[in-house]
Each structure stands twice: as structure tokens, then as C-alpha cells.
Image (cartoon, coloured by chain):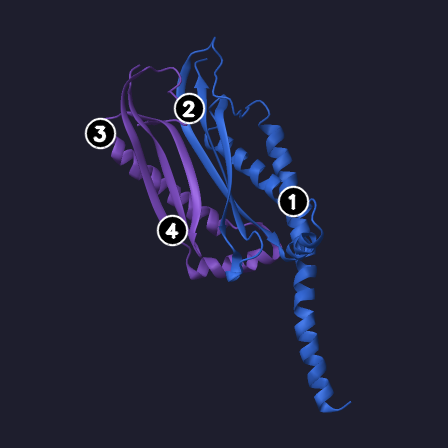
Chain colours: A purple, B blue
Amino acid sequence: MILSNTENIPGRQIQEHYGLVSGNTVRAKNVGRDIAAGFKNLVGGELKGYTELLEDARKESTNRMIEQAEALGANAIVNIRFSTSAVAQGAAELYVYGTAVKVGL
Amino acid sequence: MEPEDVIGLVFAALIYGIPVFLAVMGFVVGGMLESAHFKSIKAREAGLSHYPAVPTPSLDPGRSVAHTELVAASVVVSLDYFKRILASFRNIFGGRVRSYESLLDRAKREAILRLKEQSPEAHIIVNLRVNTSQISSTQGRKKGLGAVEVLAAGTAVQYRS
């Protein structure tokens, strides 16, 4: 599966469009990470626990999107967009969407 | 001194002392961490100066593409205690909130550097997008920026050599 956030895959021709594919996941941070982040909040800077959490969540949403595209018979996803939003206190939604296509060489 | 006075003094010291201690610690440690981070960002940016990341989607037309890859990296940052107090004072008078500017600046540069480090064999990152979103207001407080996520994404392109 070739992924890209450009309108087409550089160097390849799009042969067929399969429409929108997307994946989402909502993650809450755990108490341990919250306490660690609370201390880190005093001195500022990167909250590594939260970064890891969001990276994991983004990978999971991307995998769900890829599964959808595979089920449609696509071999690439173009125009991929990411969005993160805080949906509740301490929980964030990671949404990934794009257009499933078939590309040739 | 009466015993009541001593207890009162101890309580006053705790009530006023803890925030002052946290503010001083935030100022000293937070400032040190920030300058160390900026130093590391500058050094890594200089090392990767041959590898641009651009928001345009266009490619070098004269070269054929060997490989493309979606790259994405996020950085979650928050302000230190001292700067958070400063920023809340700034809310009264309005104007530039410099402490947030430098925080977001280093988060964005860090995220772009991580993109490049994810695909070191590529020549250029095209269609670079950078998003900022607030993911939580810390410790249940509604005010303040809390933790902010900066997400950078792009397509890493490797040309045929």
C-alpha cells in the first residue's frame, strides 16, 4: 500500500478511484501518564508520554484506513489528511482519511 | 512568639511559598530545557539543510521518482509554570504572548525535524502540512493552553540517482 498526502503518487499514474477511506480512534491518557505529565507541566517542554500516545493512536487509525482500502482492492491512498481533536476531558480523537486509488507503474 | 503565630507562619509559608517555588523552578529549569532544546534544533537543522521540506506539491520535473513515502510526526508540548503565570498576566493587557510563540516555534521545528529523520534516504519532503491542536487543558482547568499537539505531515520523495 502506497500512502501519500499529495493528489497523486509521484511518478505513477492513477488508474481507478475507489472513494473515501478513513480510520479513527479515540484514546484517553492513563493516570500514570497524567501524573508524569503533571510534573512535566511545571518545567514545560515536550510531554513525551502524550507524544507516544498520539503516535500510537495515529498508527492505529492509519492501519484501519489501510484495511478499508485493501478491502476495496486499492493499492494506494492519496490526499491523506490527519486531524486531532479533543472530544472530552483527557480524550483525543485521531482521524485519518484519504482517497483510495489504484495506481500503475 | 505564641504557638498560634508559628502555625500561622508555617501555613502562610506553605500557601505562598509553594507557588513561588514552582514559579522559580519553572523559570530556571524550564529556561534551561528550552535553550538546550533550541540548541539541539539548530544543530539538527544545520545538519539537514540539504534536505528541504516544502508546502508545495510539485516535484523536480527533470528527475524520475524512485520511491515515495507518507511521513507524519507529532510533538506534544506544554508551558512551564512561570511562563503560564506570565501568559495569564498578558491576558489582562493583551498583545503578543512571547512565551507561547517560542513554545510553538520549537514544537513546529521539532516536528519537521522528526519528519526528516523518519526517512533519511529521501531527497525532499513535498506537500508539507503543519497542524496545531489543543489536546487537553491540564489538571482539569479550563483556562490556559494546556497541552498542545503539533502534527507535521508530508510526502517524502526519493529521486532516482
Which is nearer the N-term, disc 2 or disc 3?
A: 2
On the same chain: label 4 and label 2?
yes
Q: What residue type is labelled 2?
A: Thr
Q: Nearer the viewer, mark 1 or mark 3?
A: 3
Kind of element beneath mark 1: helix
Element type at mark 2: loop
Q: Position of residue B127 (x, y in %)?
A: 48, 25
Q: Name the residue under label 4.
A: A27
Q: Do the residues labelled 1 and 2 touch (CB within 8 Å)?
A: no
Q: Are marks 1 and 3 on the same chain?
A: no
Residue picked out by circle 2: A6
Specify whether disc 4 shares its chain with disc 3: yes
Residue drawn at 42 percent across, 24 percent down: A6
- What's the mark number on residue A72? 3
Q: Is residue B135 left or right of residue A74?
A: right
Instruction: Tell me if mark 4 has few (under 14), some (14-19) or many (20+) residues whose alpha carbon lies within 10 angstroms of its own.
Output: some
* Residue A71, horizontal then vertical, whole percent: 21, 32
In this rendering, do the residues under marks 1 and 4 share a single chain?
Answer: no
Q: Relative to the observer, which residue lies in front, B145 or A45?
A: B145
- Residue type indicated by callout 3: Leu
In space, the residues marked 1 and 4 are separated at their CA atoms by 31 Å
Residue B36: mark in rendering? 1
